[in-house]
Amino acid sequence: MSRNYCGPGVAVAVAASAFVCAVCGRTSPPNDAAPLTAAAAAVATGDWGHGLPIDEIKVPPGFRIGVYAYPVPGARSLALGEKGTVFVGTRGKGKVYALSDRDGDGRAEEVATIAEGLNNPNGVASRGGALYVAEISRVIRFDDVENRLERPPAPATVNDTFPRDKHHGWKFIRFGPDGKLYVPVGAPCNVCERDDERYASIMRMNADGSGLEVFARGVRNTVGFDWHPDTGELWFTDNGRDWMGDNEPPDELNRAPRAGLHFGFPYIHGADIPDPTYGKKGRPPAFTPPAKELGPHVAALGMRFYVGEMFPPAYRGQIIIAEHGSWNRTTPIGYRLTLVRLDGNGAASYEVFAEGWLRGRIAWGRPVDVLVMPDGTLLVSDDKAGAVYRITYHG
């Protein structure tokens, strides 16, 4: 296990054998010495954003955004442990991190690497003191992990029967109110049709890996879902296909009140856009249009219902989405947090909540996931800047 003892306070050199954090003042052990980085130099000169232009991010009046943990290279999906540890998955880094804010000041003092060498461990979920991690073709489990952060246990295999395709193979996982672990399997392509019903689906299984079944079909690639706090219904984001133009198709916010529904891929995109190749087959049985069409190619990933009490009442029970940002649109779009307001069981509006990670055509950060903390604050992961942010409300 490796650690950054200053967490969000990047270590600043004071001697050959020790480093001191410019934010918290903590001195690290000699064997953790590291060269002074550009970001660390920015902190040393009084840049409390740790070299990140966080002051460029615009949030609604009364809200503030700060750095919760940095550096967290490749930070992707977020999960909260029973003792307050924030676990962070990665894609392309092979690592899983544990962020610890033991003094409760809103900044993680420690960023620990609890696993490495894994195959795109994007998804993380916590249950019963264990951490579940989703790789490309399997889900593994680290038992009693919060009591063993100093010496993490070897993982146990929960289920290793998922496809090995890397295209849309990274996974977001969460436990539902039914106690089952939901695991999506993305389409192994931009757009295609496969006989294997696991592709382009959301699956679910028991916590021990048994009882694996398809819950929803026609889902091209979801990297974020949550359950309505009152109805218990599953809502999820889905990324639309590429190469149909800058403005088609939209990304989607979908609602799945029961198992067995089909959300259109690869035949129908959005509410009623036939695919140029597969659309001639018509709408599939049990086709369910999106609850809300989102921006085209915004790469909507993590989403949560805001269930905290810190934000004003108008935000409670509404959906906050992390939009990772377009990769091939002529004019980039996304790179922001958006808010979907609900009206009963439907989505009534779609608006920007936080933006500023995009400078013209160049993005310095890309939001991936959001997590509502017990105190009502909102954490946001960013895999491009390698950071986790914290949004608070001060009225």
Image (cartoon, helix red, strand yellow):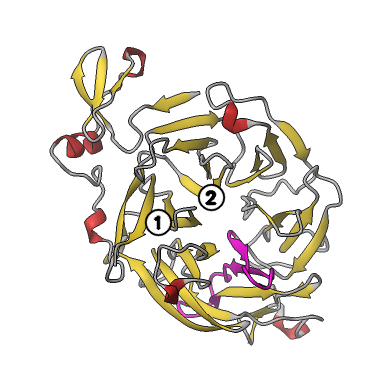
Foreground residue, 284 or 151?
A: 151
The span picked out in magenta is 223-251
Foreground residue, 146 or 98?
A: 146
Residue 367, given in percent of the width and then of the height, sits at 42, 57
Name the side, left or right, on which 237 lies relative to 386: right
- The numbered mark, 2 or 1, whose residue comes first in the sequence reads 2
For badge 1, the amino acid type reads Arg
Name the residue that disc number 2 marks. Answer: 77
Residue 185 covered by magenta stretch: no
Q: Quadrant of residue 50?
A: top left
Above or below, 89 against 328 in this view is above
**Residue 92 shows in this picture:** no
Q: What residue is at 45 percent from the left and 64 percent from the top?
A: 309
Residue 296 numbered mark, or none: none
How many other residues sit within 10 Å of disc 2, few (<14), some (14-19) or many (≥20)?
Answer: many
Residue 202, given in percent of the width and then of the height, sits at 72, 61
Foreground residue, 267 or 162?
A: 162
Query: Is label 2 in a helix, a strand or a loop?
Result: strand
Query: Is label 1 in a helix, a strand or a loop?
Result: loop
Tell me whether the residue at label 2 lies in contact with that at label 1, contact meaning CB atoms closer than 8 angstroms: no
Label 2 – label 1 distance at C-alpha: 13 Å
Above or below, 359 against 167 in this view is below
Q: Quadrant of residue 268?
A: bottom right
How many other residues sit within 10 Å of disc 1, few (<14), some (14-19) or many (≥20)?
Answer: many
Disc number lying in front (2 or 1): 2
Name the residue that disc number 1 marks. Answer: 366
Residue 236 covered by magenta stretch: yes
Above or below, 172 against 7 in this view is below
Q: Main secondary structure of the magenta part?
A: loop
**Residue 18 shows in this picture:** yes
